[in-house]
Image (cartoon, rainbow, N blue to C red):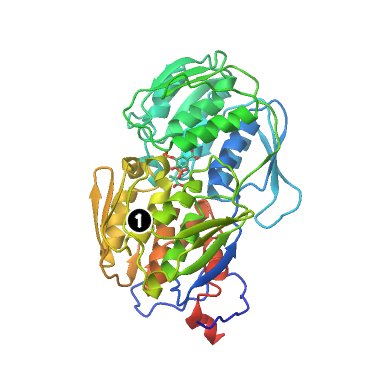
Amino acid sequence: MQITRYSAPEFDPYGDNRPVDDPDASGWIAPTATGPLDARLRLPGSKSLTNRELVLAALADGPSTLRAPLHSRDTSLMVEALRALGVGVEEVGDDRGFGRDLLVTPAELFGGSTIDCGLAGTVMRFLPPVAALALGPVAFDGDEAARRRPMRTTIDALRQLGVDVNDDGRGALPFSLYGTGSVRGGEVAIDASASSQFVSGLLLAAPRFELGLTLRHTGERLPSMPHIEMTIAALAARGVGVETPEPGVWIVPAAPIRALDVDIEPDLSNAAPFLVAALVAGGTVRIEGWPEATTQVGAELERLLPLFGARVERDGDDLIVDGGRGVIGGDAPRAVDLDLSIGGELTPALAALAAFADGPSRITGVEHLRGHETDRLAALAAEITALGGEVSELDDGLAITPRPLHGGAWRAYEDHRMAHAGAIVGLAVPEVAIDDIATTSKTLPQFPELWTQGLLRRGLAASADAV
Ligand SMILES: O=C(O)C1=C[C@@H](OP(=O)(O)O)[C@@H](O)[C@H](O)C1
Ligand SMILES: C=C(OP(=O)(O)O)C(=O)O
């Protein structure tokens, strides 16, 4: 294949894509790849690490700097919410590519504000236990879609902690609580089967409770364990040792949270669509700055992508995924049977890949995805099926039977990872029109630019040749 380079125009979210012919179709036409990739990318910081470190820095015993944090909708919501509670958050230093560092200065927390959670699970589940430490009322609300996300466990836990919560009984946003400036703490039992974030939110604030916290999970399953491990590791780095005497029980001592300057790793879950692209377009995708050791569940991609037939290797700090000839070169990925309970957020990208596999695949263990940004199981089934695929919803996942796909509208449902999944499908299927690519700003505002200019620069033959 002839590799054509072209000079990138001023950033434009439509990249090199011409408008759709169908006047009824609208949106971002996902670029098709016409040859193997040879991409090397650096990605912005992890949402999960940035929002944990913002919360811990806000509760710490002195100022902390977050180096290379993520700047996206979810992290801006967290910053604004902490500021509304009285915490100082300032941008400092130089912009080294994806925004400046953040200096967080703790302060006595005060109420009187309404916190906009947007659609961020980390904001709606991490901040209520923090707000309970403030003096005065704090109200929580978010996007319309956020009002459908499960919150009952947080509300129940606050009540067990003695916090006065005012809600409408639906177990969802909006609600308000009345902080008295302190939380007694002690024993709390919760069912966190709908989200690990219920556990993380309580653990993050617990060192500031007078008695600390003994938290017991009573449900039958607990998704996203690596995210809980990430919370425990972040606390440990700031001098708080969480004990886990048995699975599903966490003991957090009342202890100072130490101020700490931290480097935020690149977001490895956001690497998923880019790495998966190698198996669809063929060729290699290299992500820079892949950590040697990490608590991010995206690191599982190193194990998961070979199950689809990829060759994965490390070269220094880079992770390289070689997709061979890829779908467009005639190599279907291998069908898989995956339990993704530890990393449900990887499902949209891997389901999109499975739609091109050499046989039927199943992804299970992800019932809780029904309470994510949208019901991701329903959304993936609907959108892949609408393009000619055959996907059925299981109680706890998806059954995906590859069929020839055609172009058409792809709804993102305000879900960044649904938009990523549409872009993956569009690599091999012309005229996939994603209705809301801007929704990727939730965790990766640079997605359209990185996809068209970073990933596909060498694989975008048709439009690039013309330049
Ligand atoms: O704690 C976190 O940072 C997250 C935990 C997970 O939530 P669930 O356990 O609700 O899936 C994950 O899916 C989400 O993207 C981020
Ligand atoms: C589930 C996700 O987000 P949130 O943090 O809003 O739960 C996600 O990013 O896949």
Residue in the image at 39% along x and 77% along y:
20
**Residue 252 placement: quadrant:** top right
Q: Label 1 is placed on what type of residue?
A: Ala
- Quadrant including the C terminus: bottom right
- Estimate how packed mark 1 is, as few (under 14), some (14 to 19) or many (20 or more) residues with alpha carbons within 10 Å: many
Residue located beneath label 1 in the image: 351
**Residue 192 placement: quadrant:** top left
Residue in the image at 57% along x and 51% along y:
72
**Residue at the far bottom in the pictured view:** 466
Q: Which percent across, then down, holds residue 428?
A: 39, 71
User: What kind of element bears circle 1?
Assistant: helix
**Residue at the far right in the pictured view:** 93
Q: Which percent across, then down, holds residue 32?
A: 43, 73
Whether residue 249 is visible = yes
Q: Is residue 125 left or right of residue 260?
A: left
30 w.r.t. 272: above or below? below
**Residue 194 placement: quadrant:** top left
